[in-house]
Image (cartoon, helix red, strand yellow):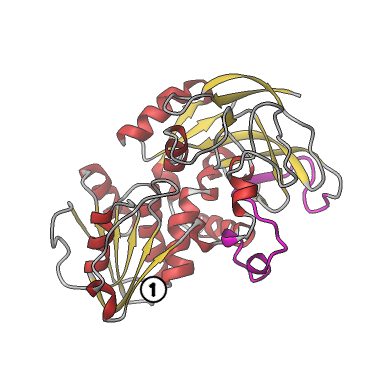
Amino acid sequence: MRIAAAVLRRPGEDPVIEEVSLDEPGEGEVLVRMAGTGVCHTDLVAIGGAMRMPLPCVLGHEGAGVVERTGPGVTALAPGDRVVLSFDSCGACATCVAGRPAYCRRFHALNSSGLRGDGTTTMGPVHGSFLGQSSFATHALASVRNAVRVRDDLPLARLAPLGGGVLTGAGAVLNVLRPEAGSSLAVFGLGTVGLSGVMAAAVAGCARIVGVDPDARRRALALELGATEVLAPSPGVVSGRVDASLETVGSGEVVAAALGVLRSPGTCASVGFRGARNPITIDQGHLVFGRTLTGVIEGDADPQAFIPRLVDLHVAGRFPFDRLITEFAFSDLSGALAAARSGDAIKPVLRFG
């Protein structure tokens, strides 16, 4: 079938919307008509060339839409189901079986090779399957593993970020750091991931939630979303020590700061992504007294379980992630990308139709 998709042809240049061919759903796949898709920092990294995606390709990995058709062997989903799309996984390796699909042994092949698991493309000469979906398009192919059915009574396009940045930040806190009620947590960087971490810390009952970011607008929003104090970054900015920290920037300076504020013992979860190689230097003295630095991908979440949990928290009024969203028409992709780069929009969401 012919669809409209934003095709990235050269690194450093924004994708351009054009017409491409999309395969019919194959074994275990579903065809999803997109309602909305988020624009994420990871998309910007890929556009800049740091992810080494094969070109031309279609990016987008925070999709939400309605199932139009299902491929052979699909029984868990049916046409008309509303779904949020997240990263793909094989479902069969040891880490998937253990309930940790974010560390699937076939993660690269299924999410950043530009190919299906069987080595074929979904769009002929254009590479797709980005994070198992390539949702910068009117339609996307996903698998039954990364298409998560959601309830019918919420605006579907606004659920899109749950599959990417929101899942990453909330999951790093709730699935990895797991703060105890009454504990303290600092969040470095108050974009989508960091603010989702702030909201998750509030859900967990943290008594002290410190948000650090240079943007006064984001600091103000963090206070409204559950932070107990907010600070502009500077050496030694956080007074006292905290039990845990979330680092969302990925620079050596910020990682060091997030380690330096920890009590002993304490844990820093680092989720900032700047590409496949991002060498940093840390002071081993930050670790030797029982402090831990751990990397986290996709919030160490199982999307099939975690996305419905976040939706339920949202409906209960405890996780207002929709306050991060600014909507753009799909035709204004360039405007959404510009707003993401400048910080004028925390989470741009492209709407279709």
Determine if the magenta segment contains residue 271.
Answer: no
Residue appearing at x 56%, y 25% in the figure: 6
Residue 50 vertical position relative to residue 181 in the rendered view, above or below = above
Q: Position of residue 126 (x, y in %)?
A: 64, 28
Q: Quadrant of residue 68?
A: top right
Q: Quadrant of residue 132?
A: top right
Q: Is residue 29 left or right of residue 283?
A: right
Residue at x 33%, y 52% (from the top left corner): 250
User: Predominant secondary structure in magenta?
Assistant: loop
The picture places residue 299, in percent across and down from the top left corner, at 49, 60
Crowd class of label 1 (few under 14; some 14 to 19; many from 20; radius 10 Å): many
Instruction: Please report the bounds of the magenta region as a residue range.
Output: 74-103
Tell me where residue 322 sits by quadrant: top left
Residue at numbered disc 1: 179
Tell me where residue 190 appears, x and y as whole percent: 31, 50
What kind of element bears circle 1?
A: loop
